[in-house]
Image (spheres, helix red, strand yellow):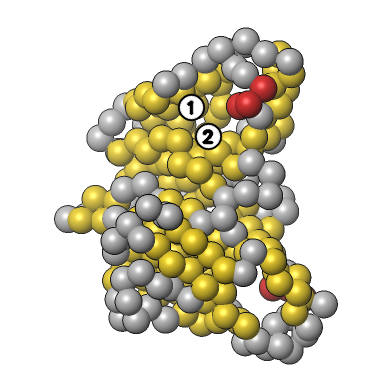
Amino acid sequence: KQEVTQIPAALSVPEGENLVLNCSFTDSAIYNLQWFRQDPGKGLTSLLLIQSSQREQTSGRLNASLDKSSGRSTLYIAASQPGDSATYLCAAYSGAGSYQLTFGKGTKLSVIP
Amino acid sequence: NAGVTQTPKFRILKIGQSMTLQCTQDMNHNYMYWYRQDPGMGLKLIYYSVGAGITDKGEVPNGYNVSRSTTEDFPLRLELAAPSQTSVYFCASSYSSRGRRYEQYFGPGTRLTVT
């Protein structure tokens, strides 16, 4: 069974700093991995999707990488802003036959002005 | 496009009551999902559907039922509500073709309290 872990549970950084959020998964037969953002009391907003055949995806100041062999994905946020403050979740499909996304518990990011 | 819409936004139920959470998507996605999110526990899949007329259980299906009569709608039914069903419920949808799975898009959620 796939398990997804995000460490740390919370992170506080000063505005302007570059930062990396971590996501690890136990089943390397991952199909794809998706990063989401969740603001308090809101739904999830998709940030990036990495297919298993890809090593990274970029969108604006965000860059997500995927290393199946080590069971890790990272989300890099460049030049952080207070508006980036939110909880970031990663989720993975396990294998080609799986219809179930397994979610990590998220990292709560606070960007201090 | 409105994306994924959910109603109601909030609801308080008494123990033993029943209700239906509505979910509609206008993206012509074939896959739809229901999740629940509990504090500190992450999101858990309740039920999913790969197309109209086809549904299957996820990780935590007990106490819930679903149906999918159209591509757009995927209602979640709670029978005999229990305090353990107090949670935030999210509906999501995605497109899948030839084995490829694309991004899941989420609705704004329904916050349910059972007392």
Q: Is the residue marked by circle 2 packed among few (<14), some (14-19), or many (20+) residues within 10 Å?
A: many
Circle 1/circle 2 CB separation < 8 Å: yes
The residue tagged with tag 1: helix, strand or loop? strand
Residue in the image at 64% along x and 64% along y: B9
Question: Are the residues under badges 1 and 2 in a single subunit?
Answer: yes
In the image: residue B18, left or right of residue A72: right
State the mark number for residue A74: 1
The residue to which callout 2 is attached is A23
Say what amino acid the circle numbered 1 marks: Thr
In the image: residue B57, left or right of residue A12: left
Q: Does residue B36 appear anywhere in the picture?
A: no
Location of residue B57 in the rendering, given as x and y in whole percent from the top left corner: 45, 74
Q: Quadrant of residue B74?
A: bottom left
Query: What chain is tagged by disc 2?
Result: A
State which quarter of the image contains the C terminus of chain A: top right
Location of residue B96 in the rendering, given as x and y in whole percent from the top left corner: 26, 56
